[in-house]
Amino acid sequence: MATGALIGLGVMSGFGAYEKSQQEKAAAQAREQAITLRMQQEQIAANQRTTNEMDQVNRLMARQDAVGAATGAFGSPSFEAIQTDTLNEFAKDENANNLNLTFQKEAGEQDIQNVKQAEKAQQWGNLIDFGSQVANLFSLGEGGFSKAGVPRGAQGSSLPGLPPPDFTGAG
């Protein structure tokens, strides 16, 4: 095969490998952005849950204050205990929500790391594929023949006692 054709095939192969690599990189970046967006949405949802729960606690506390004032129990130890229990329950719920959000963030960060590692592995695979293609082109550049003019793989029989094949047509 002509050297120019081999160079052309090599350039095409290299360009194809580069294009494939760029497409895979863009896809990995899109996956990372989707994960980041999901993490932001989870943070916003957690903030909204906290706001809603705090509103509920404030309304409950206001009702308790009204009942306490109407019954004369306002300021009594039992009234204070009820309000303390209400606030403690809110704090427990808030801690559980924060812990859940922490788990979600860590899972999202791990997903991003997995995407980056998969992209890196794919890039190495692409490089190895390209190297293999170049090696194949190099062997084609030698015409597929050994220096003695015998087709590769036909230099002789691997079976003992058998003569090498005759490719000259004389035989």
Image: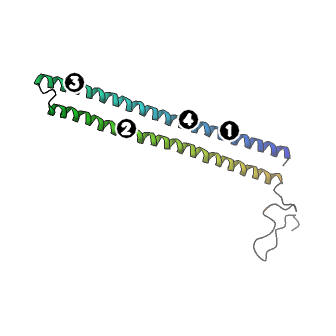
N-terminal of the pair, mark 2 or mark 3, is: 3
Label 2: which residue?
A: 98
Left/right of residue 8 with respect to residue 107 in the rendered view: right
Q: Which labelled disc corresponds to residue 19? A: 1
Q: Secondary structure at mark 3?
A: helix
N-terminal of the pair, mark 1 or mark 4, is: 1
Of marks 3 and 1, the one in the foreground: 3
Which residue is rendered at x = 12% and y = 27% of the image? 73
Left/right of residue 62 with respect to residue 45 in the rendered view: left
Q: Amino acid at mark 3?
A: Ala
Q: x, y percentage for residue 107?
A: 45, 43
Q: x, y percentage for residue 168?
A: 87, 64
- How far apart marks 4 and 3 lie (CA) works out to 48 Å
Quick one: label 3, few (<14), some, or many (20+) residues within 10 Å?
A: few
The answer to whether the residues at label 4 and label 2 have Cβ atoms under 8 Å apart is no
Q: Nearer the viewer, residue 54 or 22?
A: 54
The answer to whether the residues at label 4 and label 3 have Cβ atoms under 8 Å apart is no
Of marks 4 and 2, the one in the foreground: 2
The answer to whether the residues at label 2 and label 1 have Cβ atoms under 8 Å apart is no
- How far apart marks 3 and 1 lie (CA) works out to 64 Å
- How far apart marks 1 and 4 lie (CA) works out to 17 Å
Label 3: which residue?
A: 62
Q: Nearer the viewer, residue 147 or 71?
A: 71
Residue at the outermost left position: 71
Label 4: which residue?
A: 30
Q: Amino acid at mark 2?
A: Asn
- How far apart marks 2 and 1 lie (CA) works out to 43 Å
For the C terminus, the image quarter is: bottom right
